[in-house]
Image: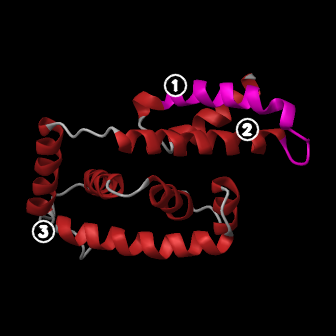
Amino acid sequence: MDRVELPLKQVIRRHVPQQEVHGVLSESLVKIWQALPGYQEKGQFLAFCKKIALRTCYDFWRVHYRRIEIQETDLQEAARTFENWLESRDKESWLEGQRLADLRGILDMALSDMCPEDRMVIQMVYLEERPAAEAAEVMGISWANVKVRLFRARKRLRKRLIEMGVGSL
């Protein structure tokens, strides 16, 4: 399992918050163990495991959105970060690395409002630069459905970013 655990951890780390990686990894390993009798050796075993891990990440977000609670302090901190970004976006002294980190935080806030399916498809195709066909296979939907989801998710994301005041980026 050691040859499988590290690649799975890398995949999971890109899809869930850092503090949740260990739990999602453990859940993925249990699901892989349970799915072993159905494995037919058609493809690579690691790809089989990654597919299960990605679906576990998807399940994590689905459960997460059902019981989401935004603490006021987290919201205030996000608003301060956003205000700092707005105030400093015209200053030449702004460090590019900090700006990108702030933008990533804003993007994460906008993505957190999306349904798990849309968030997953946006992350896989645009943030991880995976082909739409691979996203379709992992999510268990058709290639055409991925394209439709991407189109609708981009519209929702654009609308949300405009609402947040950063639509002109």
Q: Is residue 100 above or below residue 11?
A: below
| Magenta-drawn stretch, dominant element (helix, strand or loop) | helix
- Neighbours of disc 1 within 10 Å: few (<14), some (14-19), many (20+): few
Identify the amino acid type marked 1: His
First in sequence, mark 2 or 3: give its number.
2
Q: Is residue 23 above or below residue 130?
A: above
Q: In this picture, which residue range is highlighted in magenta?
A: 21-44
Q: Residue at x 26, y 67 (%)?
A: 161
User: How far is mark 3 from mark 1, CA to CA?
Assistant: 40 Å
* Cβ–Cβ under 8 Å for marks 2 and 1: no
Q: Residue at x 67, y 27 (%)?
A: 29
Left or right of 168, for residue 111: right
User: How far is mark 2 from mark 3, CA to CA?
Assistant: 46 Å
Q: Which residue is identified by label 1? A: 22
Q: Which structural element holds mark 1?
A: helix
Q: Which structural element holds mark 2?
A: helix
* Cβ–Cβ under 8 Å for marks 2 and 3: no
Q: Residue 17 appears at what percent x and percent y?
A: 41, 37
First in sequence, mark 3 or 1: give its number.
1
- Neighbours of disc 3 within 10 Å: few (<14), some (14-19), many (20+): few
Q: Residue at x 53, y 61 (%)?
A: 121
Q: Which residue is identified by label 3? A: 90
Q: Which residue is identified by label 2? A: 49
Q: Residue 164 appears at what percent x and percent y?
A: 19, 64
Q: Is residue 7 above or below residue 152?
A: above
- Neighbours of disc 2 within 10 Å: few (<14), some (14-19), many (20+): many
Q: Looking at this rendering, what residue extends furthest in the right direction?
A: 41
Depth check: give the residue in front, 100 or 156: 156
Q: Is residue 98 above or below residue 73?
A: below
